[in-house]
Amino acid sequence: MENEKQEETTETYIPKLTEMVDRLEKANKEAKEILARNEELVARNLLGGKTDAGIQPQKQPEESAKDYTKRVMSGRI
C-alpha cells in the first residue's frame, strides 16, 4: 500500500518538476540575455564618455557700482 502511494506521488510530481525546470532554464536564459545587453550599454556609456574640454564657463556679468548699491540698499545681500 505504501509503495503504491509512493509511486503515485513520484509519478504526479515528475511532470510538475520537469515543467518547473523548463521554466527556470528559460528564465535563466532570458536573464543572461538581459545581462549581456546591460553590459553592452554600460560599455557604450563608458567608451562614449562626455568631456567638458573646450567648453568655456559662463562669465558672470560685471556689476556696476550703481547696481551694487541698489542691491545693498534693497537688502538682498
Image (cartoon, rainbow, N blue to C red):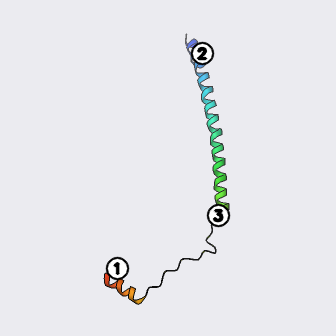
Residue positioned 63% across, 55% down in the render: 42
Residue at the spot of label 3: 49
| Quarter of the rendering containing residue 54 | bottom right
Residue 29 horizontal/vertical position (percent): 65, 39
Dot 3: element: loop
Residue 40: image location, x then y, percent: 67, 52
Circle 1 is placed at which residue position?
A: 76
- Circle on res. 19: none
Query: Please, is residue 49 above or below residue 15 in the view?
Result: below
Please, what is the three-letter code of the amino acid marked with disc 1?
A: Arg
Q: Is residue 64 above or below residue 5?
A: below
**Residue pictured at 43% horizontal, 88% vertical:** 64
Disc with the residue nearer the chain's start (2 vs 1): 2
Q: Residue at x 66, y 47 (%)?
A: 36
Quarter that holds the C terminus: bottom left
Asked where in the image residue 50 lies, by quadrant, the reply is bottom right
65 relative to 15 in the view: left or right: left
Q: Position of residue 9 (x, y in %)?
A: 56, 18
Query: Which residue in the protein does label 2 denote?
Result: 7
* Image coords of residue 62 (percent x, y): 47, 85
> Residue visible at 60% across and 26% down?
17
Name the residue type under label 2.
Answer: Glu
For label 1, the crowd category at 10 Å Cα-Cα, with few meaning under 14, some 14 to 19 and many 20 or more, is few
Between disc 2 and disc 3, whose residue precedes? 2
The outermost residue toward the left is 74
Q: Looking at the image, tell me whether mark 1 or mark 3 is earlier in sequence order.
A: 3
**Mark 2 Cα shell of 10 Å, populated few (<14), some (14-19), many (≥20):** few
**74 horizontally vs 12: left or right:** left
In this view, which residue lies farthest toward the top? 1
Farthest bottom residue in view: 65
- Given residues 58 and 29, the one toward you in this image is 58
Q: Between label 2 and label 1, give the one nearer the viewer.
A: 1
